[in-house]
Image (cartoon, rainbow, N blue to C red):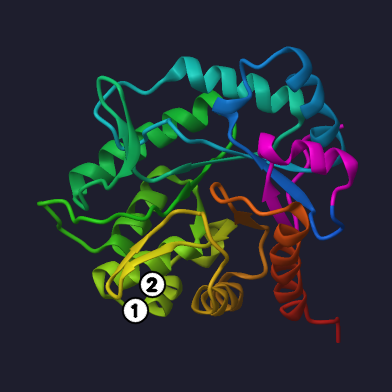
Amino acid sequence: MGPLNPHGAGLGLRRELLNALEVRVPSAIDFFEIAPENWIDMGGALARRLRPFTERYPCVCHGLSLSLGGPAALDEILLRKTKAFMDAHGIALFTEHLSYCGDDGHLYDLLPIPFTDEAVTYVAARIRRTQDILERKIAIENASFYVMADIAEMDEASFINAVLEEADCLLHLDVNNVYVNSVNHQFDASAFIRAMPAQRVVYMHTAGHYQEAPDLLVDTHGADVIEPVWALLDEAYRHAGALPTLLERDFNIPPLDRLAGEVERIAALQRSHQHPPS
């Protein structure tokens, strides 16, 4: 059987949730997302516990440390391990952040790439190399950021569009990141969504965040999704279609049933965008 494409509403497959998920996977969950760095060298009991999920459900690999915009050489060893992992588990889609997180070592944060023509060329070449090694198109995720780079020749939406075009890759649209950036950098989130090329969007994220101040949001993935982000997800579906969407929850993780309620809200919103044939 070939790789399974994700559909519907999904949840991150975190080790903290394994015990509960092994008892029962809530019906709202259609797919899981996996951070390959957390699993590719894992053997023994944990590897055996992963296999039933990848056999029963479509999964997405969402990279954490490839550092597509970073100055250090692309980690081709990690990419080859990731390809082997994806092939072994029948995973079709790989996504990664449009940012950088390392130089001589890992910086443990996602940092913004300068929005310049030179950066477009540099990042697009690294994305094309990534796609060559993985033997599939990847989707890049718009990242949250808190300071603008000193040099900027274009805005974030124009930069993303330029990278997508030059790299000929796909877009992983993180709706919460759009909202967070729109507050922190004072732009129209709806206009940003409409500026994204709908034909390249294949996957979405939604999540909660922390409000440090009225004009400063921090993308924590540690709280429930707020109403303005739900409204923005609805707009994203109107623009690009009700594409596979993941609820991100990485900290302050509540019981599975509570998470399932938010996943079901994603699914219900998706159903509202499905029109019966005429």
**Residue 171 image label:** none
Q: Nearer the viewer, residue 169 or 47?
A: 47
Q: Is residue 201 magenta?
A: no
Q: Tag 2: residue type?
A: Phe
Q: Kindly identify the residue that appears in the image at 56 percent across and 68 percent down.
A: 225
Instruction: Identify the amino acid type marked 1.
Output: Asp
The image quadrant where one finds the N terminus is top right
Dot 1: element: loop
Horizontal side, residue 189 vs residue 24: left or right: left
State whether residue 84 is above or below residue 53.
Answer: above
* Vertical arrangement, residue 177 with respect to residue 19, above or below: below
Q: Residues within 10 Å of mark 2 (few under 14, many from 20)?
A: some
**What residue is shown with label 2?**
192
Residue 208 x %, y %: 51, 62
Q: Which mark is residue 188?
A: 1
Give the residue at x 43% y 79%: 190
Q: Position of residue 95 (x, y in %)?
A: 54, 42
Asked if marks 1 and 2 touch (Cβ < 8 Å), the reply is yes
Answer above or below: position of 171 versus 131.
below
Query: Where residue 34 sits: x, y (%)?
Result: 64, 37
Q: CA distance from mark 1 to mark 2?
A: 6 Å
Q: Which residues are magenta?
A: 1-25
Going by the image, does 81 lie left or right of 117? right
Q: Nearer the viewer, residue 240 or 46?
A: 46
Q: Quadrant of the C terminus?
A: bottom right
The quadrant holding residue 147 is bottom left
Residue at the image position 26 percent from the left and 25 percent from the top: 103
Q: Is residue 8 magenta?
A: yes
